[in-house]
Image: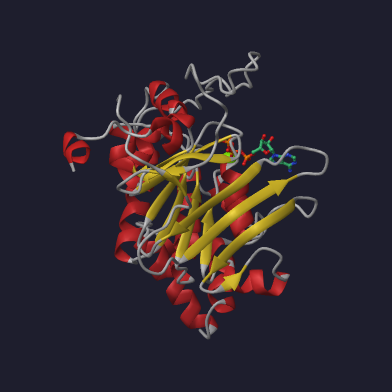
Amino acid sequence: MSARPRSQPSTPRFEGDAVLSVRDLRVAFPGAEPVVDGISFDLAPRQVLAVAGQSGSGKSLTAMAIMGLLPHRAEVTGSITFAGTELVGASESVLADVRGAEIAMVFQETRSALNPVLTIGKQLVGAIRANSDASASQAREMAGDALREVKILDADRVLESYPHQLSGGMCQRVVIAMALACGSRVLIADEPTTALDVSVQRDILTLLEQLVRDREMSCIFVSHDLGVIDEIADHVAVMHTGQIVEFGPVRQTIADPLHPYTRELLSHLDSLVGEPAPVPVVPDHQASTDPDRGCDWGHEDCDGDTELFTLPGGRQVRSCLYAPQRYAPTPTMQEVTR
Ligand SMILES: Nc1ncnc2c1ncn2[C@@H]1O[C@H](COP(=O)(O)OP(=O)(O)OP(=O)(O)O)[C@@H](O)[C@H]1O
Ligand SMILES: [Mg+2]
């Protein structure tokens, strides 16, 4: 890749109205560097946007910020708008209206989304009634339908069960059913298969894929595993130390990663869906000890420029390798003779 296309700094954007827009989102805990450090993206209707990155890169905190579920001591700035409503700094009642009814979340720890002391039926019926005008008996019927829709055949037994009586995969199906029954428009799935047995990982992924497609939902799919992302997502935002370092269509990004970190992440990928997925630990992007060199990703003449540049076609990359003033493409013969 010698000649780089001309690029310019900007924010990821989609054509048309975004369902969810995140702008310059920062999350910091008191006395520490930001752990989410100025990220921006749009989630388009029916889009599956993956957020990739190694452990600690800020994926879950981004998801929790959208859900308004960060601890109170977290300092959040920037903007998250859902259907015209600003969620950063919104009151608990505004967030409660959006959570579940509009944006649902499937967590990595399957049981954490379920109340251990209530039956699945009580929880599902409660969630449905909180988000609709359904009567108790209608809600019970809707709960059974939602469980059958996520391929739970013995729905009546499951409705009477407590979370601890169900397997992890079954609990994950229940949480997905809850999102369906509430008619959520956006699903945030944070490593939804990592805690599950290998044998059920693929079932849950297939289920998520089908539901997002059939219900025309938008989805933010968090994973460290680019193999899984390749199967499920349209676009991917690769995060490193709280920043998006690469953003683009999944196929292109995986076939031709632009950022050195994405390449590192891919080189640690020896798992695809159905096999154990170890969390990769990629060496950190260290500040160089050489004052003439700002970056330790291996580009010899990097000056530490860290803007997110947009290339023709819309792919984005945060690397000095793509800065227009330093790495403008060699003009074509046509341009020279014009
Ligand atoms: N409550 C907290 N207080 C202080 N720091 C936190 C808190 N929660 C998370 N962090 C820090 O923020 C960083 C990002 O955390 P986050 O949970 O978003 O990572 P992640 O990308 O989801 O990682 P993983 O793949 O392991 O789930 C980490 O360094 C983590 O230690
Ligand atoms: Mg996480």
Choose top left, top right, bottom left or bottom right for residue 248.
top left
Q: Residue at x 55, y 49 (%)?
A: 107
Q: Residue at x 48, y 52 (%)?
A: 11
Position in image of residue 242 (x %, y %): 60, 39
Residue 83 horizontal side relative to residue 118, left or right:
left
Residue 1 horizontal side relative to residue 79, left or right:
left
Quarter of the rendering occupied by the N terminus: top left
Compare residues 201 and 139 and report the one nearer the observer: 201
Residue 223 seen by the camera: yes
Residue 123 horizontal side relative to residue 34, left or right:
left
Compare residues 218 and 116 and report the one nearer the observer: 218
Position in image of residue 147 (x %, y %): 41, 63
Q: Quadrant of ligand 2?
A: top right
Compare residues 263 and 175 and report the one nearer the observer: 263
Q: How is the image coloured?
A: secondary structure
Position in image of residue 7 (x %, y %): 39, 42
Choose top left, top right, bottom left or bottom right for residue 3.
top left
Q: Outermost residue toward the front? A: 337
Q: Outermost residue toward the top? A: 290
Quarter of the rendering occupied by the C terminus: top left
Q: Residue at x 41, y 67 (%)?
A: 146
Residue 113 seen by the camera: no
Q: Compared to 192, does 286 lie above or below?
A: above
Q: Compared to 87, does 227 lie above or below?
A: above
Q: Residue at x 35, y 40 (%)?
A: 6
Q: Total label count?
A: 0
Position in image of residue 327 (x %, y %): 40, 31
